[in-house]
Image: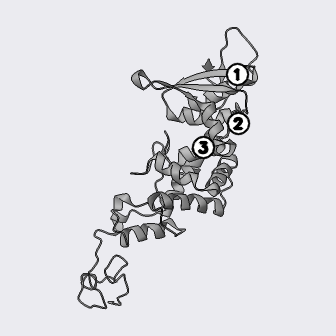
Amino acid sequence: MTDGTGVSCKPLRETSAIAPCNHEEADSRMMVHVTDAFHRGYKKIQIRSVDTDVVVLAVSTVSELGGGLELWVAFGTGKDFRLIAAHEIAESLGPMRCYALPMFHSLTGCDTTSYFQHIGKRTAWKIWKLSDMLTTALCSLRKDPKNLQDNILQTVERFFILLYDRTSSVECIDAARKDLFVRKGRQLSLLPPTKAALYQHILRSILQAGFHWGKLTSKSCDHPSTGLWGWTCPEKWKPMWTLLPDAASSCKELIHCRCRSRCIDCKCAQAGLKCIAFCTCKGDCENI
């Protein structure tokens, strides 16, 4: 039984493998106990939870511990209760996807990171299955969370572009936002995040999966400064959504015209503004 950073055991036994433990979450600390039980010779282990995060961590942990362990998750309550064979899921996914799974889960929404509107786990899973590069990138972020290489971040950014538009060929999520808004008329609430907002989300996901969940089989994990990883604390911790200024404070009304060629009396000209890509002329007019 956990007792602060220590454990209480009956009968008493040596506990240096699991204490002192600096994991702050019960979810990851459960995996430390699973690891200890496995190394002490237990081959069939069952843990109990109603949290999807625990299922994800169980699959990743049983894969990391290697063969010979049956890890069952008694999940849910009442009519929704079921036993989940984490070891069978791990075997079907393979070592790399299992190792990347916590990072995937964090990026697509977990207890401490936000979900994306109208983008479910199944949609994200289908996109992930098509990209070995994404698997490699997610593994790298979890293994070495401080090493934010541009090519890795670009791979993750491309993943989010495909979540919103599978036919897109662009590499920049801001360009994808513009294309979906201008060419396809997508509602603002259905657009992907800006590049700046996505970066903050990625930082929060790395903090969760790369640091807090980065060492599931070890009693010690790294705890960097939360404020450097997508969070801010004016009074209490809350997500740093973006470093960009709020659009509402700088643009009270989105003005656009329906002119198809150069014009001098359109809505944009009357407002003293240049035409933009959302105008029918696609911003080609030189009205100012």
Q: Residue at coordinates 49% horizontally, 25% vertically from top-left? A: 82
Q: Which residue is mark 2?
A: 64
Mark 3 neighbour density, 10 Å: few (under 14) some (14–19) many (20 or more): many
- Closest to the observer, 135 or 227: 135
Q: Regarding mark 2 in the picture, which secondary structure is present there?
A: helix
Marks 2 and 3 sit apart, C-alpha to C-alpha, by 12 Å
Q: Is residue 12 visible?
A: yes
Mark 1 neighbour density, 10 Å: few (under 14) some (14–19) many (20 or more): few
- Closest to the observer, 213 or 68: 68
- Closest to the observer, 175 or 70: 70
Q: Quadrant of residue 269?
A: bottom left
Mark identifier at residue 247:
none
Q: Which residue is mark 1?
A: 43
Its colouring scheme is: one colour
Q: Is residue 136 above or below residue 277?
A: above
The kind of residue on which mark 1 rests is: Lys
Q: Quadrant of the N terminus?
A: top right
Callout 1–callout 3 Cβ contact below 8 Å = no
Marks 1 and 2 sit apart, C-alpha to C-alpha, by 14 Å
Mark identifier at residue 101:
3
